[in-house]
Image: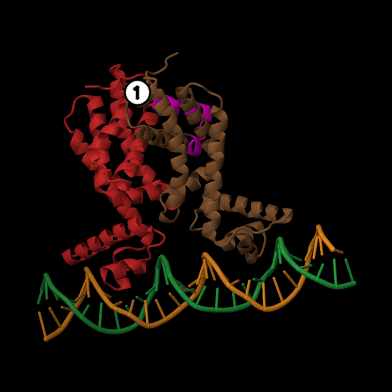
Chain colours: A red, B brown, C orange, D green
DNA sequence: AATCAACTTGACCAGACGGTCAAGTTGATT
DNA sequence: AATCAACTTGACCGTCTGGTCAAGTTGATT
């Protein structure tokens, strides 16, 4: 879309995005109509199409900014850390915490992964995360600290564990994010071929 | 639904299910209308509602039989194996192979996981798989062969790795299922706290 | 006060959807 | 040949959908 927005416009748009995220996560993308969204915000239907050219475009925008936000958090947490394995550990924890704090967005990303229309948008964002992890893994590999195995596969596996355990333990059961981060980090350390830390 | 079906009826129903699986996996559940399904099979719309009371019911039936089928395969593969860790290893491999051979069903299960309407049906089936894995893990734990950690979390993590790597490596890239099974089994063995087998 | 881009309204549209049903066909059983 | 449950047809229905648009409002700028 891309329009020249006043402050009022920016606020309205943010309002629509916020309500849409909530509704999509609660009722699902398909079950949430544009009418639902504008009714929820309390505006006319035309407002929606002033800010977005379609329901699909809105959703893609939500996905893009979400993935960007998660990566930003990960980068912030590992900034300045020398040890590649520590970067991975902190990256995993950052991911779990972001997923825990943004459960709505986690659901939307998970949904989008399995929808042909949005799969490519998701893959683009995921590729970035996997590349990040891959570079740390390769550094650790070069240092001879983990056994040689396809770094991409390892990165994907770690992402999957983080997603799944966050889903079940935090979203479904409301467990403590720190405890889940430990769980995920533990499993992944082992999966990478490192001895378990029993300290 | 549950009707008294003749052989002709059973065949027609199987025809509808087969086409629906294909269409759901290709175009998505929401984008596939009942009209699409009956057109694809080449019958009138009433036929669909003779065999199923709704589109939703058909989908749930597909999910149930899929999950049952996957478990059956797993049980068959590990039947008679004494060593709990070997049962886990073989169970992982059976899962990967089943997912690889039933890519359409893998997509549908993955989709259903994130849809409120079908999440409970999925959880019921997943619970069974997790219980199976949990019992093997507890046996290994009692034998002191793996470090003590929540067996359920371990089971969930293994399932997630199997799903994710199968998705990326087999469904997206067409890699060899045996190679992927190795990848998954390796990562999981490490995740369980076992040393890597470098033989 | 005039102007104009930004913003808002809500009736309206064409098409698709899940589901119904009265009517007709098939084929095994008696 | 008569019967009847199993099966099939496709027109039809009410509802909802994403999206349009002519008309009107707001508020900063000149």
| Residue A100: quadrant of the picture | top left
Chain under disc 1: B
> Residue B183 lies in magenta, yes or no?
yes
Point 50% across, 55% down: residue: B29
Q: Where does residue A47 sit, x and y in percent of width and height?
A: 29, 70
Choose between A72 and B15: the one closer to the eye.
B15
Point 27% across, 34% down: residue: A92
> Residue B179 lies in magenta, yes or no?
yes
Choose between B82 and A8: the one closer to the eye.
B82
Residue under label 1, please give it.
Answer: B193
Magenta stretch: dominant secondary structure: helix
Choose between B29 and D21: the one closer to the eye.
B29
Q: Where does residue A184 sit, x and y in percent of width and height?
A: 30, 33
Image quarter hosting the N terminus of chain B: bottom right
Point 50% across, 58% down: residue: B31
Q: Is residue B71 left or right of residue A4?
A: right
The vertical placement of A78 against C15, above or below, is above
Magenta span of residues: B170-190
Q: Where does residue B68 sit, x and y in percent of width and height?
A: 54, 42
Choose between D18 and B49: the one closer to the eye.
B49
């Amino acid at each position: 879309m891309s329009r020249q927005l006043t402050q009022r416009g920016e606020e309205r748009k943010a309002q629509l995005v916020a309500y849409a995220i909530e509704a999509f996560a609660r009722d699902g993308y398909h079950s949430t109509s544009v009418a639902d969204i504008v009714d929820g915000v309390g505006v006319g239907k035309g407002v929606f199409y002033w800010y977005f050219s379609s329901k699909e475009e809105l959703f893609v925008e939500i996905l893009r900014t979400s993935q960007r936000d998660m990566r930003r958090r990960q980068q912030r947490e590992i900034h300045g850390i020398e040890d590649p394995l520590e970067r991975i550990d902190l990256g995993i924890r950052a991911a779990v915490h972001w997923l825990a704090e943004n459960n709505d967005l986690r659901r939307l990303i998970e949904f989008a992964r399995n929808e042909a229309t949005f799969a490519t948008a998701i893959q683009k964002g995921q590729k970035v995360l996997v590349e990040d992890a891959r570079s740390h893994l390769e550094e650790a590999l070069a240092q001879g600290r983990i056994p040689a195995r396809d770094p991409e596969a390892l990165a994907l596996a770690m992402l999957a564990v983080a997603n799944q355990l966050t889903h079940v333990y935090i979203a479904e059961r409301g467990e403590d994010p720190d405890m889940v981060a430990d769980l995920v980090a533990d499993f992944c350390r082992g999966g990478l071929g490192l001895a378990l830390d029993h300290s």
